[in-house]
């Protein structure tokens, strides 16, 4: 039997070819293979058929996802081939279904894509027909009519289509024949037909062989022995009350429960009416669940009735009397679904960790949630807590993806415990909970943070090398290497101290791990009082992040410097100068002052003075804080001429340091006494220098002192005399004095009222001397640029007429006129935002004219200075339009234009100038003695459109004119 089965499988494998086709209706890859293929058998090139890169399958995390618990296929990620993982029996996988398809998905984790794949399992003739019982006994009465039919047991073949049961054969005999019928469901069954009357006396037992065959190649068959016992007459077979018994059964019905009762009756009497019940046709699995009582016909559940295993059960029962006559009926049990199964969660892909900062939508897990129940009992919904930064995204066919909903921050939450709840819609609903742990991987997204915004440290000067100053602390909320902080110094230069510069690294150091700052040298407060630097804290991430903090180190002072006495200064021989005090001094007379300083600071530099030793105790006293030596009482006759004092200067440090100085005071009222004392002092000093009291005094010392004092006094008086003479000379040469000789100080103009547009203003006048040459050795006069635009000023009249000055075209260039041999004086007036030059000359002013015309400039300035070289004069801007076209271009280039009412005010003055230039002057102005006009100098109508009397070429002394001063060209 096994050899025939093995041969049949080999032939079937040769007949089937592996075919991979694209199912256009479903958009799936579909393969077809025969059942019973060996483990590791090739199914198809899945990577090629799906268009996936074979080299990237492993990196992309491609794997198979099946709905059930069993995995029948495997994917080789190295070559993309699909293999058989477990040998499959079609009858076990799909039962009696005509089509057997195993679906699964190919999941590519990187791209989060599913590819649907189906593998059809085709049937091979690996099962022979088989009878439930190998021997069946029939009792037939000898009076049974010919043509009577007797049901024979059915054979069962789990194969499908042509490989299933195709027919029955009966061994040769002369009394019976075989009639094969086809039921409504397509199943074939056999009936034994009595062809010839039986004679018990002739043959009491007939042994027949019933053979069932399938349509496979080769043909497989199964046999059953039929033993016919001939009995006395029995002419009525049993009859069922119903041709079909139908019942609904709740799944999980208790064992032993009666599901349905079949009933058949026989009209015979006695043993011929006794009916027994049995299963005529039932599946092997159903025979383990149900039991038919042969006496009562009650169908009981002896196993677990599960809707998920089979939603219905069909079986045939047989009723047989004591003489072998039988009848058949069908039983249909419909299993009603009960919500007895909680949903099942099958994880397809799971990432146990994810990097913080991952973009929203990053897939954490892929899973499938199914419920084997039916209807609403099998509908599943999944959920996670709303507080999590995650969400569920349904893809298809109860597949869910767990993805990030927003960016994750490990510093806030380092690990999430995710609870996935799958709930069906049954009543009551059942649910399943699956817990996942998701760790957040650290990303270097946080720089170190110092505990303070700035640090201040203190260290006392003269510190030992290596002394700890302060500790800095910075923390990084990241994890692992990203949180490891190292410290380093940033290296600016130290502040300058006594001509040297040194980097911070030579003064201090910092421990890279602890952040402790140490001194690399001994500090001196008097050289360096403050040290500022920056410390950088850097983490170990890639790339590293860093933070800087400012650190200020203060050097604290120690009392390590004694007071230094500046006055009286000690000489090389240790002696000090001599102080003089008259003997007639009153108490409190200031003799001298001891001046001392201390290089320390604070209370270490607070100095106090005290008289340590004196020739006459009580004669002098020293200011405690000031160091002033004053007389404490009047000088007595008995007091010595020479007084020696020792002053002690002490600071306020702990312990205090001090210094002392000796002061010699000579008490004398006259120079002879002083010289006599100085002689004695010199003699004493010489004696001290000579090493003994026997040295002779130096006779020339007094003479030298007298000569020195006389020389200093003479030099001082000479200096005073020279200074007085210089001042007198300057005063005599003053222009004010020279001008005043004629009775009129032209250098001091008279302040007058002048008005523009009816607004009166008082012009303050200031007198200044001005030198307008480019240097002390040059005589070329350069007029400065003044800042007085559109200002009308009143001016004193010229004393003398201005002689005409001729010039030609070559003298006019770039807005300047060149003159020779000109005398002038110039006075500046304070007006507006600067000093305005106003022409006020004592000598006859020059005149200017263009070729062919003569016109004086006495209305505008006067000169009183003679120069041997050319003089450059800048013209006022409102005259530029009256000159050559060359000057017009210069004026336009400098944007010198007069607008608005100012232009109207200047119009009359320009007309006067034109008339003067053309030699057609109008009436002369009134003489100096004429009565004044109604218009005041400050009247706003001083300038109008009506022609005014322009000044004549030659003005007489005393004539008054009004001059309009404008800003000179730039």
Image (tube, rainbow, N blue to C red):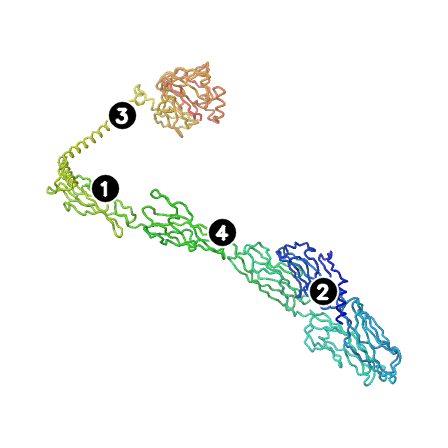
Determine the CA span between mark 2 and mark 4: 58 Å
**Residue bearing the label numbered 4:** 544
Give the SS element for disc 1: strand
Asked which secondary structure carries label 3, the reply is: helix
Q: Quadrant location of the N terminus?
A: bottom right
Q: CA distance from mark 3 to mark 1?
A: 38 Å
Q: Secondary structure at mark 2?
A: loop
Mark 3 or mark 1: which comes first in sequence? 1
- Work out whether 630 lies above or below 964: below
Using the image, determine if residue 614 lies above or below residue 861: below
Give the class, few, some or many, for how many residues have Cα within 10 Å of label 4's Cα (few <14, many ≥20).
some
The first of marks 2 and 3 along the sequence is 2
Determine the CA span between mark 2 and mark 3. Answer: 134 Å
Q: Tell whether label 4 touches label 2 (CB within 8 Å).
A: no
Report which quarter residue 124 is drawn in.
bottom right
Q: Foreground: 462 or 809?
A: 462
Tell me the quarter of the image containing the C terminus: top left
- Decide which of tag 1 and tag 2 comes sooner along the chain: 2
Is 220 left or right of 583, judged from the image as shown?
right
Tell us which disc is closer to us: 1 or 4: 4
Q: Which residue is mark 1?
A: 567
Report the residue marked by disc 2. 37
Q: Residue furthest left?
A: 638
746 or 807: which is nearer to us? 807
Measuring from the top left, give residue 258's x and y in whole percent.
71, 77
Residue topped by disc 3: 726
Residue 109 is tagged as none
Say few, some or many: other residues with alpha carbon within 10 Å of mark 1 (under 14 / 14 to 19 / 20 or more): some
């Amino acid at each position: 039997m096994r050899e025939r089965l093995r041969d049949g499988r080999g032939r079937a494998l040769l007949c089937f070819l592996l075919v991979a086709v694209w199912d256009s209706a479903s958009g799936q890859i579909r393969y077809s293979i025969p059942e019973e293929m060996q483990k590791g058998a090739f199914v198809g090139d899945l990577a090629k058929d799906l268009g996936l890169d074979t080299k990237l399958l492993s990196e992309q995390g491609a794997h198979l996802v099946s709905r059930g618990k069993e995995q029948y296929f495997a994917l080789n990620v190295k070559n993309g081939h699909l293999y058989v993982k477990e040998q499959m029996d079609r009858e076990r996988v799909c039962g009696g279904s005509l089509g057997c398809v195993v679906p699964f998905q190919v999941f590519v984790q990187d791209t989060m894509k599913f590819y649907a794949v189906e593998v059809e399992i085709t049937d091979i003739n690996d099962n022979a027909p088989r009878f439930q019982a190998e021997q069946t006994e029939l009792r037939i009465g000898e009076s049974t009519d010919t043509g009577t039919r007797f049901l024979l047991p059915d054979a069962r073949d789990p194969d499908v289509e042509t490989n299933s049961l195709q027919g029955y054969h009966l061994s040769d005999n002369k009394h019976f024949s075989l009639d094969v019928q086809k039921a409504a469901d397509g199943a074939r069954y056999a009936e034994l037909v009595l062809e010839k009357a039986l004679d018990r006396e002739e043959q009491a037992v007939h042994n027949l062989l019933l053979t069932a065959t399938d349509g496979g190649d080769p043909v497989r068959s199964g046999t059953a022995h039929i033993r016919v016992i001939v009995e006395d007459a029995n002419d009525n077979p049993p009859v069922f009350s119903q041709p079909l018994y139908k019942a609904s059964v709740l799944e999980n019905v208790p064992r032993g429960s009666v599901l349905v009762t079949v009933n058949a009756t026989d009209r015979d009497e006695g043993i011929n009416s006794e009916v027994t019940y049995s299963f005529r046709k039932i599946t092997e699995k159903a025979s383990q669940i149900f039991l038919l009582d042969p006496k009562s016909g009650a169908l009981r559940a002896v196993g677990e009735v599960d809707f998920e295993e089979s939603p219905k059960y069909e079986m045939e029962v047989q009723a047989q009397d004591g003489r072998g006559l039988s009848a058949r009926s069908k039983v249909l049990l419909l299993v009603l679904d009960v919500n007895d199964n909680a949903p099942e969660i099958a994880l397809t892909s799971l990432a146990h960790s994810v990097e913080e900062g991952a973009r929203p939508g990053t897939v954490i897990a892929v899973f499938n949630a199914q419920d084997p129940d039916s209807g609403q009992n099998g509908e599943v919904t999944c959920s996670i807590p709303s507080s999590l930064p995650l969400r569920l995204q349904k893809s298809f066919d109860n597949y869910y993806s767990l993805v990030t909903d927003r960016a994750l921050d490990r510093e806030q939450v380092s690990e999430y415990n995710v609870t996935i709840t799958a709930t069906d819609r049954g009543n009551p609903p059942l649910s399943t909970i699956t817990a996942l742990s998701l760790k957040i991987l650290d990303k270097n997204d946080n720089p170190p943070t110092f505990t303070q915004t700035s640090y201040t440290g203190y260290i006392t000067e003269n510190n030992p090398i290596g002394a700890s100053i302060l500790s800095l602390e910075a923390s990084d909320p990241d994890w692992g290497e990203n949180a490891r902080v190292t410290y380093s110094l940033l290296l600016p230069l130290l502040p300058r101290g006594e001509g040297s510069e040194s980097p911070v690294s030579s003064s201090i150091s910092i421990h890279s791990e602890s952040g402790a700052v140490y001194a690399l040298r001994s500090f001196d407060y008097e050289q360096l009082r403050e040290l500022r630097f920056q410390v950088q804290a850097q983490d170990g991430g890639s790339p590293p992040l860093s933070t800087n903090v400012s650190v200020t180190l203060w050097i604290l002072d120690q009392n390590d410097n004694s007071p230094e006495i500046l006055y009286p200064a000690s000489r090389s021989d240790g002696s000090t100068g001599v102080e003089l005090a008259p003997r007639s001094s009153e108490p409190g007379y200031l003799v001298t002052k001891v001046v001392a300083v201390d290089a320390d600071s604070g209370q270490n530099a607070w100095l106090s003075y005290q008289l340590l030793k004196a020739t006459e105790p009580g004669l002098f006293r020293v200011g405690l804080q000031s160091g002033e030596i004053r007389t404490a009482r009047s000088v007595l006759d008995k007091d010595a001429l020479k007084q020696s004092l020792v002053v002690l200067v002490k600071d306020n440090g702990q312990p205090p340091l001090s210094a002392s100085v000796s002061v010699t005071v000579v008490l004398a009222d006259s120079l002879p006494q002083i010289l006599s004392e100085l002689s004695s002092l010199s003699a004493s000093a010489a004696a001290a220098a000579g090493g003994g009291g026997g040295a002779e005094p130096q006779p020339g010392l007094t003479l030298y002192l007298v000569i020195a004092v006389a020389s200093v006094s003479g030099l001082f008086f000479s200096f005073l005399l020279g200074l007085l003479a210089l001042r007198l000379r300057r005063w005599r040469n003053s222009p004010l004095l020279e001008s005043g000789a004629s009775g009129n100080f032209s250098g001091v103009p008279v302040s007058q009222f002048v008005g523009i547009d009816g607004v009166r203003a008082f012009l303050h006048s200031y007198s200044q001397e001005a030198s307008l040459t480019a240097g002390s050795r040059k005589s070329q006069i350069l007029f400065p640029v003044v800042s007085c635009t559109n200002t009308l000023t009143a001016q004193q009249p010229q004393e003398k007429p201005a002689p005409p000055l001729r010039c030609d075209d070559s003298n006019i260039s770039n807005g300047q006129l060149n003159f020779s041999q000109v005398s002038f004086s110039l006075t500046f007036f304070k007006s507006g935002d600067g000093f305005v030059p106003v022409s006020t000359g004592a000598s006859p002013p020059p005149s200017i004219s263009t070729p062919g015309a003569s016109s004086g400039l006495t209305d505008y300035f006067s000169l009183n200075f003679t120069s041997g070289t050319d003089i450059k004069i800048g013209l006022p801007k409102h005259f530029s339009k009256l000159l050559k076209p060359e000057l017009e271009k210069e004026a336009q280039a400098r944007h010198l234009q007069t607008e608005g009412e100012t232009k109207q005010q200047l119009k009359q003055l320009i007309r006067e100038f034109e008339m003067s230039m053309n030699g057609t002057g109008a009436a002369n102005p009134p003489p100096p003695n004429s009565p004044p006009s109604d218009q005041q100098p400050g009247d706003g109508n001083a300038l109008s459109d009506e022609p005014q009397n322009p000044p004549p070429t030659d003005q007489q002394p005393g004539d008054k004119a009004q001059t309009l001063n404008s800003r000179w060209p730039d």
